[in-house]
Image (cartoon, helix red, strand yellow):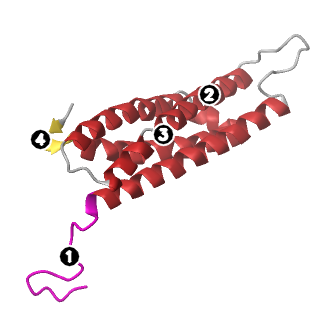
Amino acid sequence: MSLINGLPAHVLFVHIVVVLVPLAALALVAAAISPRVARRMGVVLPVLALVALVCVPLTTQAGEWLERHVDDNALVERHAELGDGLLPWALGLFVLAALVWWGARATAEPRTDAKGTGVWSATPVRVAAMVLSVVVAAGAVVDVYRIGDSGAKAAWHDGFSKTASQGDADD
């Protein structure tokens, strides 16, 4: 997909990624820290992360189309390079969201391992899930910020006047 209503699709898709990836990251951290929150979110948690994951390559492909239709410059190239790095973070969000969702279900439905204790409720497993969730969520959000910042610089560098046009006195 290259154009939507005459606009480059990347310009539209990027807004979905900028909202859904940080939202999925925040939801993941909340659910990983609190099993009660995870149970309340239910299947919404992995579905949100899945939609964010699917939107990342769509946005990247639309961005590659747009890159071929704009003038070459270092800012656009840097933005494209950074954009290629988001997919692993989004995949990590999805995998951990599915794991946390499954774990919350497992604690709600009494299932036990061979020793008779709940596997998910075991402290080392939950702590590992919490730590991984915080690390992956932070990485994803920082990456979205870095990509967005580079994209804004690529799009707006020398694209506006620092002085008001047409005698507008508002600064």
How much space separates mark 2 and mark 3, taking CA atoms?
25 Å
Question: Magenta segment: does it hold 167?
Answer: yes
Quarter of the image with the N terminus is: top left
Q: Which residue is mark 3?
A: 85
Reply above or below: 78 against 32: below
Mark in front: 2 vs 1: 1
Within the image, what quadrant is residue 12 found in? top left
Q: What secondary structure predominates along the stretch shown in magenta?
A: loop
Q: Which residue is mark 1?
A: 161
* SS under mark 1: loop
Q: Which residue is mark 4?
A: 5
Q: Residue at x 34, y 55 (%)?
A: 75
* SS under mark 2: helix
Within the image, what quadrant is residue 165 found in? bottom left
Q: Is residue 171 left or right of residue 48?
A: left
How much space separates mark 3 and mark 4, taking CA atoms?
28 Å
Task: Say whether disc 4 or disc 1 marks the residue closer to the N-terminus.
Answer: 4
Q: Residue at x 34, y 61 (%)?
A: 153
* SS under mark 3: loop
Single out the residue that lies furthest toward the top. Answer: 114
How much space separates mark 2 and mark 1, taking CA atoms?
49 Å
Do the numbered discs 3 and 1 sit on residues whose CB atoms are within 8 Å? Answer: no
Do the numbered discs 4 and 1 sit on residues whose CB atoms are within 8 Å? Answer: no
Q: What range is drawn magenta here?
A: 155-171
Give the x, y percent position of residue 164: 17, 82
Reply above or below: 148 against 129: below
Q: Which residue is mark 2?
A: 101
Q: Amino acid at mark 1?
A: Ser
